[in-house]
Amino acid sequence: MWWSGRAGTVALTALVALTSVTACHPVRITPALRPGAHGPAVRDLQARLAQLALFPHDPTGRYGAGTARAVRTFQQEAGLSVTGTYASADRSALTSRTRRPTHTELHHTGKIRDRSDN
């Protein structure tokens, strides 16, 4: 067989099929939450911890001492590394043990707000 060094249409099609990405699913990277963090992700964390009776306050969306304490308690009970920082392994464990918080759970539970959790 003689080889010209040029790729034919069939060869190029096969090469493209073997090297192209046919499906791309974006990977969602969620940063770890730690004291000082704030926002909807913290509010979700607090509501989920409240479902497990580990966070006895209204969700504030601020990751303070009370949230860190609840995260450490959850980590210990779940057999995770006790750091007080809410990272990927903690998120997986917590979401498997809780349900998606309702609007009421996220914004008002009727509990006394603990101002020390700022």
Image (cartoon, grey):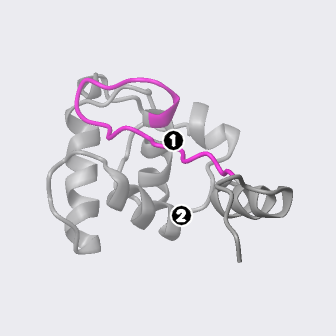
Camera-side residue of 17 and 76: 17
Q: Is residue 22 visible?
A: no
Residue furthest to the bottom in view is 1
Q: Does dot 2 land on a helix, a strand or a loop?
A: loop
From the image, which quarter does the C terminus lie in? top left
The three-letter amino acid code for the residue at tag 1 is Asp
Left or right relative to 112: residue 105:
right
Q: Quadrant of residue 22?
A: bottom right
Residue 80 forms part of the magenta stretch:
no
Mark 2 highlights which residue?
Answer: 98
Mark 1 to mark 2: distance in Å? 11 Å
Residue stretch in magenta? 24-41
Q: Residues within 10 Å of mark 2 (few under 14, many from 20)?
A: some
Residue 26 forms part of the magenta stretch:
yes
From the image, which quarter does the N terminus lie in? bottom right
**Reading the chain from its start, which is encountered first: label 1 or label 2?**
1
The numbered disc on residue 44 is 1
Tally of numbered discs: 2
Q: Residue at x 38, y 23 (%)?
A: 38
Q: Residue at x 51, y 69 (%)?
A: 96
Q: Residue at x 53, y 63 (%)?
A: 98
Q: Main secondary structure of the magenta part?
A: loop
Q: Is residue 28 above or below residue 59?
A: below
Camera-side residue of 2 and 60: 2
Q: Quadrant of residue 37?
A: top left
Camera-side residue of 36 and 102: 36
Camera-side residue of 86 and 15: 15
Left or right relative to 19: residue 17:
right
